[in-house]
Image: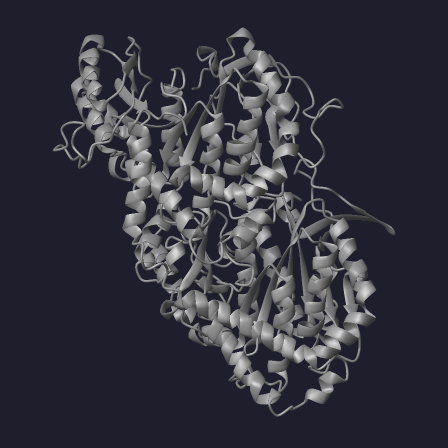
Amino acid sequence: MPQSLVIQVGQCGNQIGSRFWEQALAEHSQTNRKAIYDESMATFFQNIERRGKRRAAVPVGDGTGQIKGLEARGLMIDMEEGVINAMDGSPLRELFTPDQILTATSGSGNNWAVGHHHYGVQYGDHLRDMIRKQAEACDALQSVFLIHSLGGGTGSGLGTRIAAFLADELPDVYRFATVVAPSPQHDDVVTSPYNAVLALRHLAEHADAVVPVENQALMDICAHAGVTDPKADTKPFGAMNQIVAQLMLNMTASMRFPGSLNVDINEITMNLVPFPALKYLLASMSPVAVRPAAGAPAASVRVDRRVDQMFTEAFQPEAQLIKCNPRTSVYVACAAMARGALQVSDLRRNIDRIQKQLQFVWWNQEGWKTGLCHVPPATTTESLLTLSNNTCIAQSFAGIKTRFMKLYTRKANMHHYTEYMEKAEFTDALASLNSVIAEYRQVERDPGPQDVEDDDWEAWARAQVRGRVGSGMNGV
Amino acid sequence: MNDPSKHPTFFTKVPVKGAATSADDPVPPKTGNALPPQPTAAYVPRCVLLDTEAKVVSSILRERPPGRKWRYHPKCVHWRSAGAANNWAYGYHRHGATMMATIEKSVQFQVDQCGAAFGGFVVLHSLAGGTGSGLAGSYITEQLRATYPAATIINQVIWPFAQGEVIVQNYNLVLTLAKLTQTSNAVLVLFNDHLHRICQSRLAIASPSFADLNRIVAHLLARLLPHNLVPPAAGFPLITAYYGPQIPAAAVPFTTLTWSGVLNPLMQMARTHTPTDEGLPWDVRDAADPRACVWNGATVVLCGRGRGDAADGARAFRGLGGKVRVVGAREVESAAGEPDKWAAVVGPTSALAAPLARGACKTARAHVPGPARFRHQYARFGAARTDAFAGSDWCCC
């Protein structure tokens, strides 16, 4: 079974990351009650046996060996110490050995250029070594997940530098970036538009797929679910991070657990990225379980209505992890990945129903990729993740661009950046963002060939084949 | 098929000894071989299991239903862990050569087991994904054809749901069918949409699972494969099958069947490309009707009692067009829970034109003006532009 690395960078990345590992363990422990180190566990974890000072990796073998000690296949990177030090003493901290952790003391000052150019150069060789070492511990490394923010300095700057290292060191390994985009309403970093635009350019270059999520969307989902932080005026970060962690677990569920319609991680890029530049995937989930269902009744009866409702909700604007409305824009492609006791007929029924409500690009009218994984998440009996390539993402990018231009035209804060980088990087990054926006808009506006009607195409092709069968099928 | 000794076509008796992986095992690392040591002789199916990921194959190996008197030969099970990404090019170019090298000895072993009675291969795969289409359907079939030129190769392919299963399914299926027309003797096309409809409307399964769909395919294959399915005219090997009666197992004891009751609807299903006998357009009476499918020969397979009636009923199939053969109709006892009369018609028909046209049309229109969609994904694993075009040319020009 293929393996994955998770690289968490910066404050945001590490906070989401720690939720991710917590939930990943919870998920595996509910299916793996005998603590066996099997293929499924091996996706994200190493099995390490320690004897005194000696440390040996125990392979999966025939899949019946006990777990000796788990280590995460991942890296924790931050240019401050706060978040990572706060994990000291927690069980999660034991998943990481010192050579999987890189911290510095002075932070990146919310400056992309510091993360990317200063720390990126200073720790470049060291980071490459760390990556190589993790990759060598895998026997079938297939994908790397990067988690970082777009608005800060370390995550956006160093995170995108790491993406470049990955492309260089592990060219055949799929690179997924789960990035938290700043939202206009609740932005506590003045320079976040700069950081986001500069970072997006490098993701455009080095990532195979980018799954952006927005703080505002996460907060709204939490508010809707009735989760607020006890300290009233701060954001419910715990629950928000949990949603992003859940997103990543659902995305990788089908590669870790059995199902009747598996979706390997490389199938996601294959099906959802028709052009290399259109690689931004809009995610939505239903139901969103932000709290563990403590004392929830054991579900025994399967209710179709609940399954259908789950599909309906996942296609509502409120369920999207970015503030946008995919229903008013054009779908380039869409994946529906279900977990739990669903059957293929549940997919068929709901896709037939929902397809009518959505607008797909003319050349991909049935652009659905579907998946069924039999193991549900730890907190609910079933769940649905949709990943869609939708042109509405251009509006989010346009919003970031507007905020970028506000600063850029006034040259505000620019000297902090030019201390570490050429000014031309701003124009390059802006050009890159413009071209992504333009490409999505072009897809959205493309009416398709007007002269050939769809039915004509089909009738013509049908006549060709019919003629061949009818005429005794004399050769090809 | 619980008693393998009665089915020498599909099973062989071999001594399965000791450890699964021995020193002279051709299997390179990363390929699993998972059965625990099993002494004594056993019946093994004449088959080689192959996948580019581990989950499905390993769960099949874990299945040990009570009463099963056979098991897969441990050396004939092979997998990788990388997957094929729903990408024909990944399956064909990336996995092809190494995977063929891996299974070569297993295939030869099974061929040797058949001895002089060896007839050929049946390759079971899908058209939508990367492994089924690129690896099994295209590369492996090509290599089998090269290594065993005299063998009959039948590919049983599953046509994906029209609405969404894999987004790039039309590319993969056109690329695969383009190869298969050159390498395969018969390509038996079965449609997921049809199987699903049979389950829901005829077998009273409210929420069919893939296991339900697969059961129909397996049952159909077991009855069809002993007969010669190769269509009479060379060059266009695509065939499909219709069968009846379709009744839930629970209703079998309460059903009395006559041959005309089985064969008449079947004939109409074949003529109008309808997977079930529900809502059949009975007004399509002969081949001259524009709605009727053109057949170029057909094989009618009969199973069950009552020979005379069956022959009468089967005569009606001559109306389909081409040469019609009737096989089976022996005095066979049907297994418990199965209807005592069963029939299928299989052959090349113009009914295949519509889905084929739709698939080709989708692929073709993704190539019309503008940049080629998904091409970079195929190019990543070495599919040349010409591969894709060869595929769509075959269907459209």
Residue, x 72% and y 65% (percent of image)? A162
- Residue A134, placed above or below residue B303: below
Horizontal side of A145 relative to A462 (left or right) equals right
- Residue A466, placed above or below residue A388: above
Residue, x 30% and y 59% (percent of image)? A356
Residue, x 65% and y 21% (percent of image)? B105
- Residue A177, placed above or below residue A141: below
Where does the N terminus of chain A fall, quadrant-wise?
Answer: top right
Q: Is residue B36 among the parts visible in the rendering?
A: yes
B391 or B188, which is in the foreground? B391
Question: Where is residue A311, by image quadrant?
Answer: bottom left
B3 or A148, which is in the foreground? A148
Q: Residue furthest right?
A: A53
The image position of residue B90, as x and y in percent, is 58, 43
Question: Where is residue B92, by image quadrant?
Answer: top right
The image position of residue A39, as x and y in percent, is 63, 43
A70 or A457, which is in the foreground? A457
The image position of residue B220, as x and y in percent, is 36, 25
